[in-house]
Image: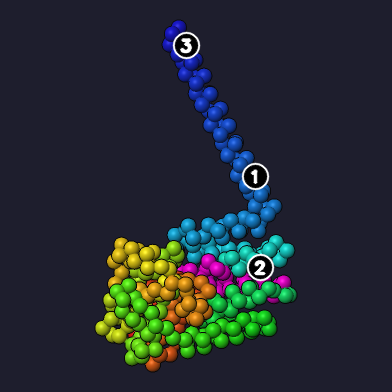
Amino acid sequence: MAIVARAEETSFLVNIELMTLKFRLLSALVLIGEAVSAQQANPAKAIQERIHGLRALPDDRRAVETKRLALEIRAISPADNALQLALELSSRATEGDFGRDTLREVEETVAEEIKSTGHAPDNAYDELARVVHYEGLDIRLDDPGFRSALARLEAADQVRQNADFTLHDLGGKSWRLKELEGKVVLVNFWATWCPPCRKEMPDLQALSKRFAAKGLVVLAISDEEDAKVRPFIAAQKYTYPILLDPGGAINKRFLVQGIPKSLVYDRTGKLVAQSPDMRTMTQFLEMLKRAGLE
């Protein structure tokens, strides 16, 4: 009798566990169904959430997801804020080296959404022009707003070509840009609080050492105070010159609106390459190649 009772008790417990598992499974399916329904009801919101999560993904997955998002944005209605989603994606898509195909898909999406609106705001033209101009993408848009945005960038290039600075590094040495002709100069605008800036600094350190004998000078300019910059550099042990521009006067002179921003001048002092945001080692090498350094 005891054996039978224990068997019945065991069977009862097993049934309870199975019922619990079924309840949890059904609950999970309900939640999944609600999430899918929400995405179907508001695809723009779902896309925006995925865009905001891009930078948490590994580089290889981020590139694939970025391209997928570009195609999905094209499929939704302009009334669902497609242009704004395309601009948000564009602002993230140029961070790192995703390859030409991914960048092209993103910027073609921006161009398509601009066409769909009939009259886009200036920031849309500015974003498309920024990437097309600095990344060298062959994307054409027959629109006066786009042409004006490209013209503004070309005017800014001319300002940076002619601009000069004299700043001191952390060791007190004075550096003047126009006195460095004969050298290849990479000017990098950065700040300690900027994650993309910090991410590319090891590459700048490696490039500074690798090409020093060939005449490369890396000058990194921060608009922060000495008290913030000095301990950060000491902890990271970077050895290329770190110049201080407290108040950001030189940032303003060079029309730097976002960081990191890098400029490469060749041995004649000509501005030959610029970055719109963070660069990878591969991209830095390509920029230096335009200055005849490889």
Q: Quadrant of the C terminus?
A: bottom left
* Front-lying residue, 3 or 275: 275
Q: Quadrant of residue 3?
A: top left
Q: Secondary structure at mark 1?
A: helix
Real-space CA distance between mark 3 and mark 1, rounded to the nearest whole angstrom: 43 Å
| Front: mark 3 or 1 | 1
Is residue 14 located in the magenta-colored stretch of the structure? no
Q: Secondary structure at mark 3?
A: helix
Q: Main structural element of the magenta stretch: helix, strand or loop? A: helix
What residue is shown with label 2? 83
What residue is shown with label 1? 34
How many residues crowd around disc 1 within 10 Å: few (fewer than 14), some, or many (20 or more)? few
Q: Residue at x 60, y 68 (%)?
A: 87
* Front-lying residue, 7 or 248: 248
Q: Quadrant of the N terminus?
A: top left
Q: Which mark is residue 25?
A: none
What residue is shown with label 3? 5
Taking 175 as reference, is 62 left or right?
right
How many residues crowd around disc 3 within 10 Å: few (fewer than 14), some, or many (20 or more)? few
Real-space CA distance between mark 3 and mark 2, rounded to the nearest whole angstrom: 69 Å
* Front-lying residue, 278 or 142: 278
Q: Position of residue 98 (x, y in %)?
A: 47, 69
Q: Residue furthest left?
A: 213
Q: Residue at x 31, y 69 (%)?
A: 238
Q: Bounds of the magenta span?
A: 90-117
Real-space CA distance between mark 1 and mark 2, rounded to the nearest whole angstrom: 27 Å
Taking 158 as reference, is 41 left or right?
right
Q: Answer with mark 3 or mark 2, whichever residue precedes in sequence.
A: 3
